[in-house]
Image (tube, rainbow, N blue to C red):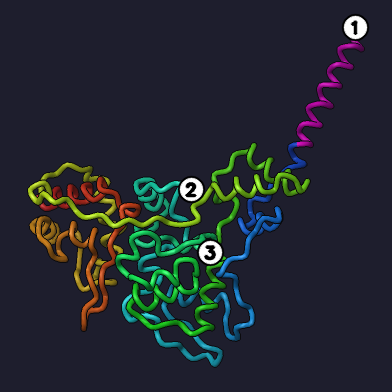
Amino acid sequence: MKKLWMGIACSCIVLMLSFILKEEHYILDQNLSVRETLESLGEYELTNHEVDSSIKGASVERGMEIVTKGYTRNKNGRKTSRISKHFVCTSCHNIQREDPNLAVIDPQARLEYTDAVGLPFLQGSPLYGIVNRDSFYNNDYEKKYGDLVFAARDDLRQAIQLCSTECSQGRAMKKWELESVLMYLWTIDLKMNDLDIDKEEEMLIAKSIKEESNTKDAADLIKSKFLVESPAHFIPPPVDRTERKKSMGDPKNGELIYNNSCMHCHDNRKYSFFNLDHSKATFRNLRNNLDNFHERSIYQVSRYGTSPVAGKKAYMPQYTKEKMSIEQLEDLKSYIIQEAN
């Protein structure tokens, strides 16, 4: 009897070990990029924004400088002219991940996530992972930039140039500058550990790679874990101006927006002619202008932005409903009213 039980125990151990080894047999390298994983599956499709390594003078380092500083140095070591006198890419775009779930549009989750990791809450889509997208300047951006968006919609190079000349009110990039930016953006593409993939899904993908089976299903699973385009819809502020001065939001949440969004550009006029701080006079000024139709009304500038004019080309881009919800704007208003009293 003792031998029988020992035999059963050994068999169980063997089965457990074989199951464990089978699991270990299908382990996905989470440090791989999404592109590398799709290539391993044989399911990666070339896009219009592949790097052109034949462009002389282009480099990742120069691209990173252009994105973060607005200028770089050419092959002779000379400082280039600024792409824009008013903005750099990071004025409006984060270069780190800013959403807890890359497959979901949720402005509040984005606000809480960016606050937790110390990032600003910005109008533009993050540059992190932008090379993994297929479409740019989507939906209502056609209303703002007209036919210019059509060339940029499925071509990241054209989207970058549109951002340089129109959004940042600057100059077009030279070929080597543009390719440098693209090279840098490919270093901040999505990685597998950015995606919301559970253990079972991980094993399925790893098995598909190893056995070269069901590769399309595995690729479709990966692509379902992030957005290939960022929707953008412009919405107006409330029509009833009497409602604007009622405090109906969450001032604590509004404080996050004020500190992480408003102050990002307006603190000591960093990117703006309009200075903001935490003084009562500032909050009273904002409160008193809530129902007005000019740039000191948070309703006006949040939903319509401001336009560049002669001698004052630095302007404010608006927040789409995907970047700041109706409720969040009410939260910001409630914080301003609270601090003004």
The residue singled out by tag 2 in the image is 103
Q: Quadrant of residue 316?
A: bottom left
**Is 179 covered by the magenta stretch?**
no
Q: Is residue 119 left or right of residue 295?
A: right
Mark 2 and mark 3 lie on one chain; the one further toward the N terminus is 2
Q: Main secondary structure of the magenta part?
A: helix
- The image shows residue 41 at horizontal and vertical percentages of 70, 53
Tell me which residue sits at (43%, 54%) in the image.
Answer: 98
Q: Which residues are magenta?
A: 1-22
The residue singled out by tag 3 in the image is 131
Tell me which residue sits at (45%, 66%) in the image.
Answer: 153
The amino acid beneath tag 2 is Ala
* Number of the front mark, 1 or 2: 2
Q: Nearer the viewer, residue 154 or 3?
A: 154
Q: Is residue 3 above or below residue 47?
A: above
Tell me which residue sits at (77%, 41%) in the image.
Answer: 25
Q: Residues within 10 Å of mark 3 (few under 14, many from 20)?
A: many
The residue singled out by tag 1 in the image is 1
Which of the labelled discs sits on residue 318, or is there none?
Answer: none
Q: Is residue 11 left or right of residue 329?
A: right
The amino acid beneath tag 1 is Met
CA–CA distance in space, label 1 to label 2? 57 Å
Q: Nearer the viewer, residue 39 or 335?
A: 39
- Badge 1 marks a residue whose secondary structure is loop
CA–CA distance in space, label 1 to label 3? 65 Å
